[in-house]
């Protein structure tokens, strides 16, 4: 009971962290319940139509589940790392690793429950939207009502709470094992390197994404109903794999661009120092960037290839299916985009003390903003680079199967649009939040 009371008090005194965690869990629960509600609607249709609903709920819901779990783990991991000093002080006054773990997991589960309850209402409306689009595509009879019942509630509640608990427990397990001295040192200079489990998981998920691409190119003929589901998983799983490897990728890119950045002056030198010293923290902002770029590019081009491969006049059904696909892609892309902004804001707000200290030792506000801008440019470029590589696992195999060509006969405008959005969101969120943070007097920011 003491730990639960402490967790609730901690949430009240850390509203920024509460909001960041709540947003990720709320959006994730909304997506999960939207597509899980198709399983409730299945009770009102025949067996063949029910199979279509089950496949769609499983395929699209599976994509959403992977993205939700990774995004929640990234956000909660980032927020827990920001509390290394607090956790070290709790250990110094006698808190055990088990108590620290229960504190972190208790906070995460409490936020997840609130997020789930808040997500029920929007999920009802988005579930009806998807059912309406299925009717327009003639995949469902017009008379079938959209249902929102035990499957949506059960899956939404169970997975949201489970994702939060697993993400918090995974992070808490590592933080709780760190001693007081090591915890304070980590809080001041950053974590040295990512965990071995994360590296292994990243490699395995990346290999699975590549395998999905190979399977698409070698097994399918282009007319199978499951082609789009398997083909889309190539980009999404590859993006998730790269996202798990984000700290290592960011460290490698930082080493490559360190000399050019230092030549830009004081801001560049500060940016290099931060990118080296706070790799784990900044990599948290890289995760949603990779996910957004890889998922959006891969799935949008997949639909474009599908459109160009269609023979003859496009029917109303084909156009409705295209609309349905774009709505599905749009919902998941919107989730990744909001997570990108959410994570960057949470990361930058936490650095207000750092910005104050830099100004006290002589850095000017323009130099601090320049540092943040250069860091944002590195994050945006790295995210776009590896997100683009991840999208190849869908675009190339799908194009080979549907058109016989390695490169799709599609406009580059789609890709440029995704890149522009990713870069704009990254720079606007980081620099805009930093601009607000440095308005606070330096001495006050360091308290």
Image (cartoon, rainbow, N blue to C red):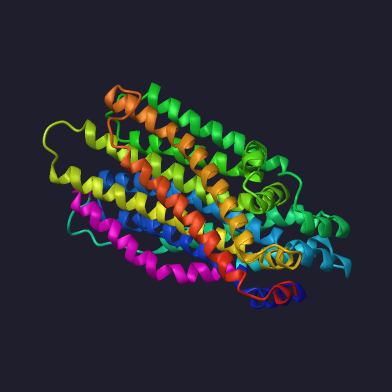
- Give the residue at the far left of this rendering: 313
Direction from residue 211 to residue 96 in the image, left or right? right
As drawn, 109 above or below 285:
below
Residue shown at 56% from the left, 52% from the top: 376
Residue shown at 63% from the left, 61% from the top: 368
Using the rendered image of the protein, determine whether residue 37 is visible from the camera's viewpoint.
yes
Q: Is residue 124 magenta?
A: yes
Front one among 440 and 226: 440
Direction from residue 118 to residue 359 in the image, left or right? right
Measuring from the top left, give residue 31's x and y in whole percent.
42, 57
Front one among 250 and 178: 250
Measuring from the top left, give residue 339's x and y in whole percent.
50, 57
Direction from residue 397 to residue 336 in the image, left or right? right
Location of residue 317 (image quadrant): top left
Location of residue 120 (image quadrant): bottom left
Residue shown at 44% from the left, 29% from the top: 213
Q: Main secondary structure of the magenta part?
A: helix
Give the extent of the magenta segment.
111-139
Measuring from the top left, give residue 435's x and y in whole percent.
56, 67
Q: Is residue 222 magenta?
A: no
């Amino acid at each position: 009971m003491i730990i639960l009371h402490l967790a609730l008090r901690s949430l009240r005194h850390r509203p920024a962290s509460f909001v960041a965690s709540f947003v990720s869990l709320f959006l994730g629960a909304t997506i999960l319940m939207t597509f899980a509600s198709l399983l409730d609607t299945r009770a009102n249709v025949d067996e063949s139509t029910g199979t279509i609903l089950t496949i769609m709920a499983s395929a699209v819901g599976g994509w959403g589940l992977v993205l939700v779990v990774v995004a929640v783990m990234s956000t909660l991991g980032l927020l827990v790392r920001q509390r290394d000093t607090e956790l070290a002080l709790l250990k110094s006054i006698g808190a055990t690793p088990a108590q620290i773990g229960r504190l972190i997991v208790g906070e995460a589960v409490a936020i997840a429950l609130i997020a789930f309850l808040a997500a029920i209402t929007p999920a009802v409306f988005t579930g009806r939207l998807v059912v309406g689009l299925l009717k327009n595509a003639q995949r469902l009879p017009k008379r079938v009502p959209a249902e929102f019942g035990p499957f949506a509630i059960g899956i939404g509640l169970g997975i949201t709470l489970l994702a939060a608990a697993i993400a918090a427990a995974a992070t808490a397990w590592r933080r709780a094992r760190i001693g007081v001295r090591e915890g304070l040192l980590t809080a001041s200079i950053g974590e040295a390197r990512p965990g071995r489990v994360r590296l292994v998981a990243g490699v395995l998920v990346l290999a699975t994404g590549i395998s999905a691409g190979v399977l698409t190119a070698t097994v399918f003929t282009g007319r199978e109903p499951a082609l789009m589901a398997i083909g889309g998983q190539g980009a999404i799983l590859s993006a998730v794999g790269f996202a798990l490897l984000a700290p290592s990728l960011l460290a490698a890119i930082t080493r490559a661009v360190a000399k050019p950045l230092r030549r830009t002056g004081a801001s560049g030198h500060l940016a290099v120092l931060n990118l080296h010293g706070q790799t784990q923290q900044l990599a948290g902002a890289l995760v949603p960037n990779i996910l957004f770029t890889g998922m959006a590019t891969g799935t949008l081009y997949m639909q474009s290839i599908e459109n160009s491969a269609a023979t003859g006049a496009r029917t109303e059904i084909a156009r409705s299916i295209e609309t349905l696909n774009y709505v599905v892609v749009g919902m998941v892309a919107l989730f990744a985009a909001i997570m990108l902004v959410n994570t960057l804001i949470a990361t930058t707000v936490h650095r207000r003390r750092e910005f104050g200290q830099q100004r006290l030792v002589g850095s000017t506000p323009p130099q601090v903003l320049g540092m943040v801008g250069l860091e944002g440019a590195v994050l945006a470029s790295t995210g776009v680079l590896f997100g683009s590589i991840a999208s190849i696992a869908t675009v190339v195999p799908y194009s080979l199967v549907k058109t016989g060509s390695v490169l799709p006969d599609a406009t580059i405008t789609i890709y440029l649009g995704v890149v522009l959005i990713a870069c704009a969101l990254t720079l606007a969120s980081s620099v805009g939040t930093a601009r607000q943070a440095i308005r606070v007097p330096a001495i006050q920011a360091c308290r």
